[in-house]
Image: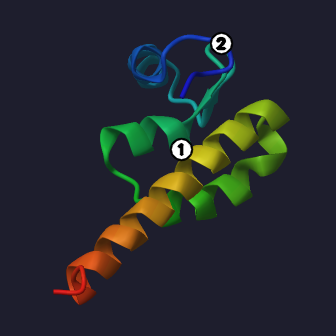
Amino acid sequence: MQCIQGFPLKRHVKKCIQAQNTNNGYYNREFNMCLICIEYEKGKLLATEGLRNLEEMKPQLEEKHYIEVYDKLYDDQIEQQLEEYWEQWGFGD
C-alpha cells in the first residue's frame, strides 16, 4: 500500500509519526496521512477499530486516501477473521 504522495507506506508512516509528534495533529496535511494509518502501522489499532475510526474521520479525509485505507483495513480484517476461523475449526483434520 502506498500513501497519496506515492511513497511506500512504511517510510511515509515514519515521516508522519515524526510530524505528528511535533504538530500534535489529528490529521497531518503536510504528509496527507491520517492518525488511523499511523496508529494501525504501530500496531495500536485492530482492523475493526480502524474501520470504525475511519468512518468518523471520513469528512476530513481525501476520497482517494479513504478508499486506500478502507481497502487495506477491510482486507486485513477478513484475513484475521479467516485465521481465527481456521484456528478454531482446523483444516478438516
Seen as rendered, the residue at the extreme front is: 93
Badge 2 is on which residue?
30
- Label annotation for residue 93: none
Badge 1 is on which residue?
36
Where does the image place residue 82, in percent across and percent down from the top left? 39, 71
Residue drawn at x 77%, y 49% as measured from the top left: 58
Q: Amino acid at mark 1?
A: Ile
Residue drawn at x 45%, y 17% as measured from the top left: 22
Q: Amino acid at mark 2?
A: Glu
Is 52 located above or below residue 20 in the figure? Answer: below
Horizontal relation, residue 51 to residue 39: left or right: right
Q: Nearer the viewer, residue 53 or 92?
A: 92
The residues tagged by marks 1 and 2 sit, at their Cα atoms, a distance apart of 16 Å
Seen as rendered, the residue at the extreme left is: 93
Q: Earlier in the sequence, mark 1 or mark 2?
A: 2
Q: Secondary structure at mark 2?
A: loop
